[in-house]
Image (cartoon, helix red, strand yellow):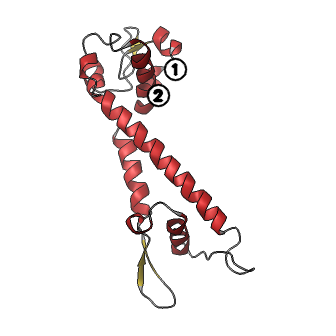
Amino acid sequence: MKTLFLTLLATVLLSTALFVTAASSQVAVCNPEVYGLTAELIACTHQLHGHEQWRHGQGTRYHTWDVYRYEAAVLRNYLRRLAERYAMVVRWAPVAQCESGGRWSLSTGNGYYGGLQFSLRTWYAYGGQGMPNAQPAWYQASIADKVRVRSGLQHWPECGSRYAA
């Protein structure tokens, strides 16, 4: 959970970097609050790294407005997925705390694995890959969400009530 949050935070902080323009030595800010997650933000960030938009045969090759728009769309999609994963882990964290003490990689040899203590039968029946305890928290939470949607929280009779809807 902390890893997802820190990755999201680092991504946003990197996109708010400062740079000095060579011509005027004024400080310009690549700030998502100003630009949004748009091609303008991507262009600003590329300028930070010394690249100039390709125009009329001048500038840095492959740094075109179409590329900037594509990169902005990729960034928005990545951050949306990251936020969704983070939110899912936050909802399932109280259940994991109850089931396994919040240890998402738990394997005690009792036939149940991971932070949400999946049986292998349930894990594979709902599309889980590999061993539950070897998967990240967001992946375990996504399988648990499939279980919850299809058959409710009764798979966690003691701890399911702690799910934070």
Residue 127 lies, in percent from the top left, at 54, 19
* 135, above or below 119, in the image: below
- Decide: few, some or many residues near mark 2? Use Cα within 10 Å; few <14, some 14-19, many ≥20: some
Name the residue that disc number 2 marks: 135
Q: Residue at point 48% right, 15% down?
A: 123
Name the residue that disc number 1 marks: 128
Image quadrant in which the N terminus is located: top left
* 56, above or below 41, in the image: below
- Residue type at numbered disc 2: Gln
Residue 38 lies, in percent from the top left, at 51, 62
Q: Are marks 2 and 1 in contact (CB under 8 Å)?
A: yes
User: Residue 136 lies in what quarter of the image?
Assistant: top left
Residue 90 vs residue 72, the one in the foreground: 72
| Left or right position of 77 against 29 | right
Residue 24 lies, in percent from the top left, at 47, 91
N-terminal label among 2 and 1:
1
Residue 30 vs residue 100, the one in the foreground: 30
Label 2 or label 1, whichever lies nearer to me, is: 1
Please, what secondary structure does the residue beneath circle 2 have? loop
* 99, above or below 81, in the image: above
- Residue type at numbered disc 1: Gly
Residue 84 vs residue 116, the one in the foreground: 84
Residue 104 lies, in percent from the top left, at 36, 27
